[in-house]
Amino acid sequence: MIDVLVVGGGPAGLATAIACAQRGLSVTVAEPRERPIDKACGEGLMPSAVRRLAGLGVHPKGHVVAGIRYLDSHGQVEALFRRGSGLGVRRTTLHSALADRAGELKIPVLPVRVTEFSQRGSTDEFTAGESGPGVTAAGIRARYLVAADGLHSPIRRACGLDPRPARHVRYGLRQHYLLAPWTSLVEVYWARDSEAYVTPVDEDVVGVAVLGDGRASFESRLAAFPALRERLAGAEPVSSVRGAGPLRQDVAHRTKGRVLLVGDASGYLDALTGEGIGAALSEATALADCLAVARDVRVTCSHARS
Ligand SMILES: Cc1cc2nc3c(=O)[nH]c(=O)nc-3n(C[C@H](O)[C@H](O)[C@H](O)COP(=O)(O)OP(=O)(O)OC[C@H]3O[C@@H](n4cnc5c(N)ncnc54)[C@H](O)[C@@H]3O)c2cc1C
């Protein structure tokens, strides 16, 4: 039996696996997609997220982000980060850096999609060995299963923890342009029913994410931001349009027995916060700390019994 089976090898899952391995827990990741995994994202890491990544031994290359600027048709306002810098990082770059670190720590990544599991025993049993409490999925027995399987988490659904459908359904789309960043700030453009984020991710690439109510094409969303469209005029798109949604997912409970939710599976933070990945990294570290304490209690109990 291993300590932790992590379902989902995105930022939350890989960060959880790395944090667990750093604490001496045995951990395996199940992720059906090949690396590097891309995703619709604004790709802005806030300073706290950069610090959390460094704590995991992960140092992705990107473009320094010095703060945030908000703009609408009436004006603009901006603020610099007070402590440290953020980082604009392509998702594929971030994923490669996390996957490389997981490889260094010899964390197995199984190419499987997990949709079912069974669990036995309560969370406060400390019995060691194969007969002890645990979760079985994909033929693996683990003391805990961490669901890091994203916004529409199949594991969360199987646990009966899915949120009620949201009344306002928002979607996000992203595309990259070959264009030297004109600022080291993340720019947030406002329109009536939508917003756009521009993040410098390389010396000659900016990422643009647009969000709004209901489904729409990238071009039609961009039309709501004439000043941004002018900036991008003539710049070559260097990625395909990718989408995500519906975005709002309030989750009332983040555990079901020995199944623990992290990252977007545990509830979606509005992309406007720029904290989705940072929150996932914080959860991953806190979860690994708790599991390490549970392991120490288990070891102490089994020593006391023998
Ligand atoms: C438009 C937009 C802009 C955003 N901008 C930012 C931003 O600027 N900064 C920021 O920090 N955050 C931003 N976010 C949020 C951020 O993208 C997410 O919070 C982050 O991707 C969550 O990571 P995750 O690992 O929880 O989920 P994901 O990245 O979705 O990873 C989930 C993984 O689970 C795998 N999986 C799914 N089902 C299974 C299964 N059954 N078995 C095994 N594996 C499975 C998937 O293949 C995937 O690799 C933005 C989001 C959107 C939509």
Image: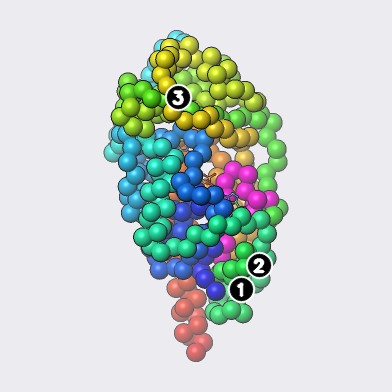
Can residue 293 be spotted in the picture?
no
> Which residue is the extreme one toward the bottom?
306
Name the residue: 59% across, 70% down.
141
Residue 145 part of the magenta segment: yes
Question: Where is the N terminus found, in terms of image quarters?
Answer: bottom right
Reading the image, the residue beneath label 2 is 119
* Residue bearing mark 1: 133
Mark found first going from the N terminus, 1 or 2: 2
Q: Position of residue 239 (x, y in %)?
A: 47, 30
Residue occupying the point 49% across, 40% down = 38
Q: Which residue is mark 3?
A: 237
In this picture, residue 232 sits left or right of residue 220: left
User: Circle 3 sits in a helix, a strand or a loop, which is it?
Assistant: strand
Q: Is residue 302 left or right of 250 when viewed as pictured?
A: left
Callout 1 touching callout 3 (CB < 8 Å): no
Q: Residue at 61% across / 73% down in the picture?
A: 133
Type of the residue with mark 1: Pro
In the picture, measured across the screen, residue 141 lies left or right of residue 231, that is right
CB contact under 8 Å: marks 1 and 2? yes
Q: Between residue 238 and residue 306, name the one nearer to us.
A: 238
Q: Secondary structure at mark 2?
A: strand
The part of the chain drawn in magenta is 144-157
Q: Is mark 3 within 8 Å of ligand 1?
A: no
Ligand 1 is within 8 Å of the C-beta of the residue at disc 1: no
Q: Residues within 10 Å of mark 2 (few under 14, many from 20)?
A: some
| Residue 105 sits above or below residue 193 on the image | below
Which of the marked residues, 1 or 3, is nearer the chain's N terminus? 1
Q: Position of residue 27 (x, y in %)?
A: 48, 65
